[in-house]
Amino acid sequence: MAEHLTNTDSEQYIVTARKWRPQRFADVVGQEHVSRTLRNAVESKRIHHAYIFNGPRGVGKTTTARILAKAVNCENPSAECEPCNVCASCTDINTGRSMDVIEIDGASNNSVDDIRKLRENAKYPPVKGQYKMYIIDEIHMLSSSAFNALLKTLEEPPRHLLFVFATTEPHKIPATILSRCQRFDFRRMQIDEIAAQLRYISEQEGISIDDETLAIIGKKGDGSMRDSQSIFDQVLAFCGKNVEYARVNEALNLIDTEFYFTLGRAIREHDVAKILEIAREVFMRGYDLQECLHGLAEHFRNLLTVLATGSASLIEASKLHREQYMSESTHFTQADVLQYMTIIMNTEQQLRYAPQPRLRFEFALVQMAKLDSAVLLSELLAELAELKKKLPELGEGIKEKGKGVKVEEEDDDLEDLSVLDSSPVDVAPNDVPEELSVEHISSENLDENLAESQAEIPAQSAPKAAPRFITAAILQAEWREALEGHEKLDAAIKTYLQTPAMVRVQCGDAELVFSADMDFVADKFVECKQQLSEMLSAALGGEVRIRVVGGSAAGGAASLFQAFVENSGEESKTLESVPELAVQEQEQISSSPTTIQSSANTSNDGLFSGKAFQMKEQAPPPPKKPSAAELHELDRAIIEHFGATEILVRT
Ligand SMILES: [Zn+2]
């Protein structure tokens, strides 16, 4: 390493950051990508006239700028183009006396006048060296007119001029400036890099210091060499030349890693009394609550890495603590740790605005202690599946219970089943979720009942479907498929019947309603609908009924809407009358017993498509054509009344 400012007893004390400031590109720690590029530029004489050094505080931006200034002006540069630090130019720059290197604080010299002054002075060539360098710190603080004034110089700079702009917030610099500069991003320093540099300094100064202390200083320095060196100075002031970890904690009022282990243990043991005691200690010692939470989050993060990777290699801690993390992790699951971390993260945010941070802090700790051990849903399901395999008779028992009494007596026809389905099913609340049991009943019984009729059904729709939840969309898709495969209906009728007028899906059963305006469609369709209904029921594993409204036998689908229009003054009455009307019509047209239903039971959870309300031109009393607003109103009313969540798009 190059010469450094001397620091003997008789001389003034110089802080570590200044005393050990790197003097050559090779000495800069952690920014090799920048120093190598710059040295190569000097070597090949391809010096750009303006550089932007971006990065967090204390990572070597100004230091690197000074080294660059020395390197381009040095009288005896080394073979690697490093400054000699001996010649007049180098020593002037090192001691801050150089006329050719001007450092400006952009935060306090941010006006357009300051920049004008700079431009005036920049015209004059350098006194000693080849280049005159302006280092502007915090360049993002310049006013916009100051930036504009600077732009003029950047556009056509004199040959001798060199700018280095240092910033922590490059996004605040105008694009016009950025585009005229070469940008270098300095990175935060790793704890290891800081610790290594501090160890080197300690060795040079004859200070004994342990690894744990160096790690903790590096961690507290938060990626900044200058901050770390300041903390290092503070520790030296407290401990003298013999630095011990225990005393360092005292000196910096740091929370010991051991403290987090104690706290973590209390949390996993649900020991609220202990938690409150620890919280009190935190307040008594005057620890920063945010820092404490931050440390606890890191503690759990460390545990998580051990749980996830099975090793402690990703933990930034001493060897002793790494081993401790390995053994402590056996008491936690990943899900537990994630829950704790979520609470901590939320609390960290809320603590800033909490009127009583202490309470908020305590609350978070107690909340964590009170958490039950988390179980992954996937694990639970796997266990359940395992259990089912072991005890098949148990599974049967649940099904039997779900069926209720009725089903076992009446398992010979579908009609009874439909009545059962639409009424609430008798299930013991703790046994099985209600929907699940309903699905079971439907499929079980359908399988038995459809055994005979399946002989007639075309082969492609024969495969037995597992019970599943169906939506209106699924039902419609299945309907189209069934319709397509049907042999008796001709293509024109199929096209006509593509979209049902009304689709209603309720737990366990479903209904499709068609408005068949033309008699030949209605007649033909009524013939086939029983078969289609059975096909759908088999495919979906639930009861699916098909109803035809229309034809010469009744007012048709138009009257479905007519009822609404006529009574539109009284909304509630109208809407109640809609299903009743539908039932009447259905009774007249359809002779099938499968469609028998009570409007009280089935009008809930309905899902309607707008097609049900399409007008029928040749219907005897010419119905009033609904306006767009009325249709919209009708949709809204249907949603409200029937609790439907979806209205199909009107065609
Ligand atoms: Zn030199």
Image (cartoon, rainbow, N blue to C red):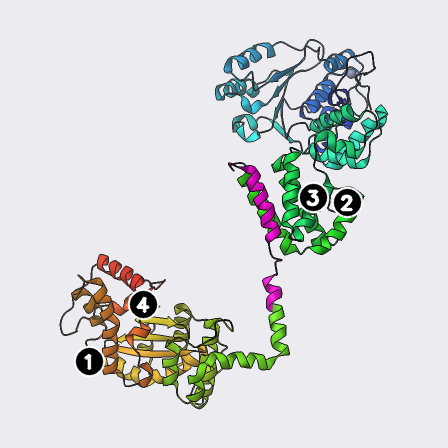
Write down the region rendered in magenta.
352-381
**Dot 4 alpha-carbon crowd within 10 angstroms: few under 14, some 14 to 19, many 20 or more:** many
Q: Which tag, 1 or 2, sits closer to the chain's start?
A: 2
Cβ atoms under marks 3 and 4 closer than 8 Å: no
- What is the secondary structure assignment of the residue under circle 3? helix
Mark 3 vs mark 2, CA separation in Å: 11 Å
Q: Which of the two marks, 1 or 3, is nearer to us in this view?
A: 3
Residue 293 appears in the figure = yes
Residue 477 vs residue 411, the one in the foreground? 411
Q: Which residue is mark 2?
A: 321
Residue type for callout 1 = Ser
Q: Which tag, 4 or 2, sits closer to the chain's start?
A: 2
Residue 118: % across, % down:
57, 13
Mark 4 vs mark 2, CA separation in Å: 65 Å
Q: Which of the two marks, 4 or 2, is nearer to us in this view?
A: 2
Q: Which tag, 3 or 4, sits closer to the chain's start?
A: 3
Mark 1 vs mark 4, CA separation in Å: 23 Å
- What is the secondary structure assignment of the residue under circle 1? loop
What kind of secondary structure does the magenta stretch mostly adopt? Answer: helix
Residue 19: % across, % down:
77, 20
Q: Which residue is mark 3?
A: 260
Residue type for callout 3 = Tyr
Determine which of the numbered discs, if any, sits on residue 608 in the image.
4
Cβ atoms under marks 1 and 4 closer than 8 Å: no
Name the residue located 50 percent from the left edge and 77 percent from the top edge.
466
Name the residue located 17 percent from the left edge and 74 percent from the top edge.
619
Mark 3 vs mark 4, CA separation in Å: 60 Å
Q: Which residue is mark 1?
A: 552
- What is the secondary structure assignment of the residue under circle 2? helix
Q: Which tag, 3 or 2, sits closer to the chain's start?
A: 3
Q: Which of the two marks, 1 or 4, is nearer to us in this view?
A: 4
